[in-house]
Image: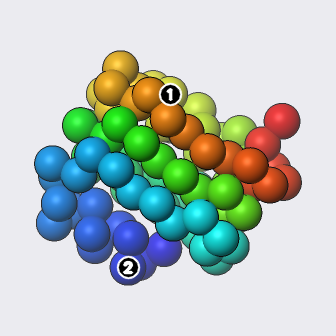
């Protein structure tokens, strides 16, 4: 989480992030991306430890209007 949060803070123009298979990523990661990356278009986080709470934060963020590809396959907390 801390590593991706640092990337999010330092790369505010980030448009695509592919961290599929990183099972240690959590809602904290999603919240950091939602807060700091308003241009995010693709977020590929399959197998992450993310649930509906994290996705709700993402949906409410400014990046939601740009997000065209979201992969939450095998994120067990997502309903």
Up-down relation of residue 8 to residue 15 (above or below): below
Q: Distance between the residues labelled 2 and 1?
A: 22 Å
Of 44 and 61, nearer the camera is 44
Please state the horizontal and vertical placement of residue 8, each as a whole percent of the image: 28, 61
Residue 43 relative to residue 37: left or right = right
Please state the horizontal and vertical placement of residue 3, each as a whole percent of the image: 38, 79
Q: Which residue is drawn at 31% across and 41% down?
A: 40
For disc 2, the neighbor class at 10 Å (few under 14, some 14 to 19, many from 20) is few
For disc 1, the neighbor class at 10 Å (few under 14, some 14 to 19, many from 20) is some
Residue 56 relative to residue 30: left or right = right
Kindly identify which numbered label has been placed on residue 59.
1
Q: Which residue is drawn at 50% across and 35% down?
A: 69
| Residue 69 seen in render | yes
Of all residues, the one furthest to the top in this rendering is: 65
Residue 74 relative to residue 9: left or right = right
Tell which circle, 2 or 1, labels the residue nearer the N-terminal end. 2
């Amino acid at each position: 989480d801390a590593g991706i949060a640092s990337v999010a803070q330092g790369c505010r123009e980030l448009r695509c992030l592919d961290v599929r298979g990183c099972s240690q990523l959590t809602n904290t990661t999603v919240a950091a991306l939602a807060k700091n990356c308003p241009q995010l278009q693709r977020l590929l986080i399959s197998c992450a430890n993310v649930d509906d709470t994290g996705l709700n934060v993402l949906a409410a963020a400014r990046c939601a209007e740009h997000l065209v590809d979201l992969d939450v396959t095998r994120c067990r907390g997502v309903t």
